[in-house]
Image (tube, rainbow, N blue to C red):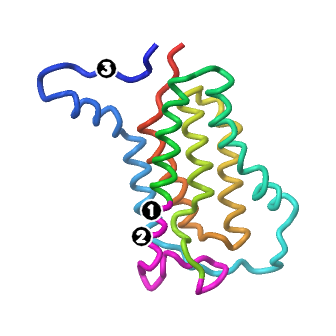
C-alpha cells in the first residue's frame, strides 16, 4: 500500500495541497526554535571543572547516541517496510545536507559578537552551529516516532537529550548549537516521514 498522501486534481493544483500537508504547525515550531537558536547564540565558553568526561558521558558519545539511528535504519528492515526505507533515504540525504551545508555557511558568521562556528573548546575551532550529533539523534527520533508510533519517544527522546547534553559537556558545542541541531533534524525529517499504513 502506498503511504504518500493523495492530492486533489484540478483547482489550484496538487503542489499547493502537497506543500500545505508538509508544512504544518510542527514545522513552524521547529523553524522558530532554529531561528531563536541562530539569532541568540550561546557564548562558547568551556565548562568549568574537570575536563575528564565521566563514564556515562563517554558511553553516550561513543555508543548511546547511535540508538536512534540504529532504530531509524533497523525498524524498516525488520518490519520489511520498503516505503519507510525509501523515505529514509530522502531523510538521510536531507538531514545530512541540511546540517553540514548550514554548518559550513554559518561558520564565519558573527551575531552579537559571537562567531557561530566557534566551539567552546577554543577560539580557533570551527563548525559549531548546528550540531550534527544532535541533528542525527533528532532525525532518528522524529522518523521512528512519526512512522512507527509516538510510544517510541519514551526511548528516543532521552537519547536525544543525552546526546545534546554530552556534546555540551565535552565542550564540542554550545547550547544554541545543540538546540539548532535538534531543530534542523526535525525540519529535514518531518516532510519525508509519514505514519505507516498497515
**In this rendering, position of residue 82 left or right of residue 152:** left
Q: Are marks 1 and 3 in contact (CB under 8 Å)?
A: no
Residue found at the very far left of the displayed protein: 11
Q: Residues within 10 Å of mark 1 (few under 14, many from 20)?
A: few
Q: Give the label, 1 or 3, closer to the camera.
A: 1
Residue under the image location 84 percent in, 58 percent down: 56
Q: Measured along the vertical axis of the image, is residue 190 above or below residue 60? A: above
How far apart are labels 2 and 1 at the CA level?
6 Å
Judge whether residue 41 is colored magenta: no
Label 2: which secondary element: helix
Label 3: which residue?
A: 6
Question: Could you tell me what secondary structure mostly forms the magenta stretch?
Answer: loop
Q: Residues within 10 Å of mark 3 (few under 14, many from 20)?
A: few
Judge whether residue 103 is colored magenta: yes
Q: Are marks 2 and 1 in contact (CB under 8 Å)?
A: yes
Label 1: which residue?
A: 101
**In this rendering, position of residue 105 left or right of residue 130:** left
Q: Which mark is residue 105?
A: 2
**In this rendering, position of residue 73 left or right of residue 27:** right
Label 1: which secondary element: helix
- Report the front residue among 65 and 39: 65
Q: Measured along the vertical axis of the image, is residue 10 above or below residue 181? A: above
Amino acid at each position: 500500500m502506498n503511504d504518500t498522501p493523495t492530492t486533489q486534481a484540478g483547482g489550484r493544483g496538487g503542489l499547493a495541497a502537497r506543500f500545505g500537508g508538509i508544512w504544518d504547525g510542527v514545522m513552524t515550531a521547529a523553524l522558530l526554535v532554529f531561528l531563536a537558536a541562530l539569532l541568540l547564540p550561546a557564548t562558547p565558553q568551556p565548562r568549568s571543572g574537570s575536563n575528564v568526561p565521566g563514564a556515562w558521558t563517554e558511553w553516550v558519545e561513543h555508543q548511546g547516541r547511535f540508538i536512534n539511528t540504529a532504530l531509524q535504519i533497523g525498524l524498516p528492515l525488520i518490519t520489511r517496510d520498503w516505503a519507510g526505507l525509501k523515505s529514509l533515504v530522502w531523510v538521510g540525504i536531507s538531514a545530512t545536507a541540511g546540517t553540514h551545508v548550514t554548518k559550513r555557511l554559518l561558520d564565519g558568521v558573527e551575531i552579537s559578537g559571537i562567531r557561530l562556528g566557534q566551539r567552546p573548546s577554543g577560539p580557533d575551532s570551527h563548525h559549531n552551529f548546528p550540531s550534527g550529533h544532535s541533528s542525527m539523534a533528532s532525525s532518528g527520533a522524529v522518523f521512528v516516532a512519526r512512522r512507527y508510533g509516538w510510544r517510541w519517544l519514551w526511548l528516543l527522546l532521552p537519547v536525544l537529550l543525552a546526546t545534546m547534553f554530552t556534546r555540551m559537556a565535552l565542550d564540542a558545542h554550545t547550547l544554541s548549537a545543540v538546540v539548532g541541531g535538534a531543530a534542523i533534524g526535525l525540519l529535514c525529517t518531518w516532510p519525508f516521514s509519514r505514519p505507516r499504513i498497515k
